[in-house]
Image (tube, rainbow, N blue to C red):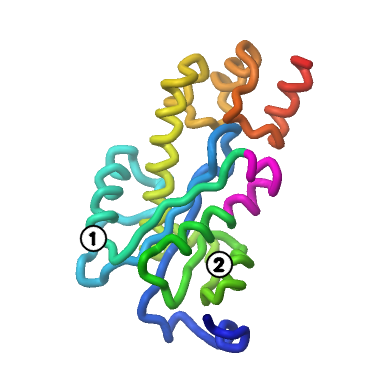
Amino acid sequence: MMDNLDFFMMDVSDARIICGTDEAGRGPLAGEVYAAAVILDASQPIVGLNDSKKLTSRKRDVLFDEIKNKSIAWSIATASVAEIDELNILQASLLAMTRAVEALHTRPEWVWVDGNQYPKLLQASGYAGKALVQGDALEPCISAASILAKVARDASLDALHIEFPMYGFNQHKGYPTAQHMAAIAEHGVTPHHRRSFAPVRRALEQRA
């Protein structure tokens, strides 16, 4: 583990093993927040990497498999609904990204984090890196992480739909659409809803 001086003096130009990490699912009212971390292999370039939100579902699925097959290392992690409610969604997202980086079987020398905050837990564990606003559109390794996180999270909401078909999770993926809000009003809140989010909290209060 590097000491604090090494951490602050290191630059990405000094790193050979570079990781990107990103999250998916900060805005929805239900489900875990997902994060992924990816170390790309320069000898196996992947064409078409971009911010996952700018890609079609079919393109994301194709890239999902290619990223897993061609990367030096990749991992997917989550923070639970309980952790989201306890910590707040930002801190839970940073926790999920930290878990994803720490789960890599190859330790990166530099970590690009999508957003404007570098996780304190990563810094405390000696991972050099930097937050990068709109990094999922700027750094291919972050783009790759955003795709893994998005596809994995969408799959989890598809599975949740099987358990709670009346909510339409397979369509809105937990976001506060009119369909979702109507389902909450009619059927109430599931154990998978984030009670710290205002629309869910209001729905609970109205049914109390």
Name the residue carrying label 1: 70
Q: Amino acid at mark 1?
A: Lys
Which residue shows up at 36% across the image and 80% down it? 16
Residue 3 relative to residue 144: left or right: right
Q: Nearer the viewer, residue 181 or 127?
A: 127
Q: From what the image shows, is residue 147 above or below residue 196?
A: below
Which residue shows up at 47% across the image and 62% down it? 135
Name the residue carrying label 2: 131
Q: Secondary structure at mark 2?
A: strand
Q: Residues within 10 Å of mark 2 (few under 14, many from 20)?
A: some
Chief SS of the magenta region: helix
Residue 91 colored in magenta in the image: yes
Residue 130 screen position, x and y as percent = 54, 72
Q: Residue furthest top?
A: 186
Q: Which residues are magenta?
A: 82-93
Residue 84 screen position, x and y as percent = 64, 43
Q: How many numbered marks have been drawn onto this rendered protein structure?
A: 2
Q: Earlier in the sequence, mark 2 or mark 1?
A: 1
Residue 95 colored in magenta in the image: no
Q: Amino acid at mark 2?
A: Ala
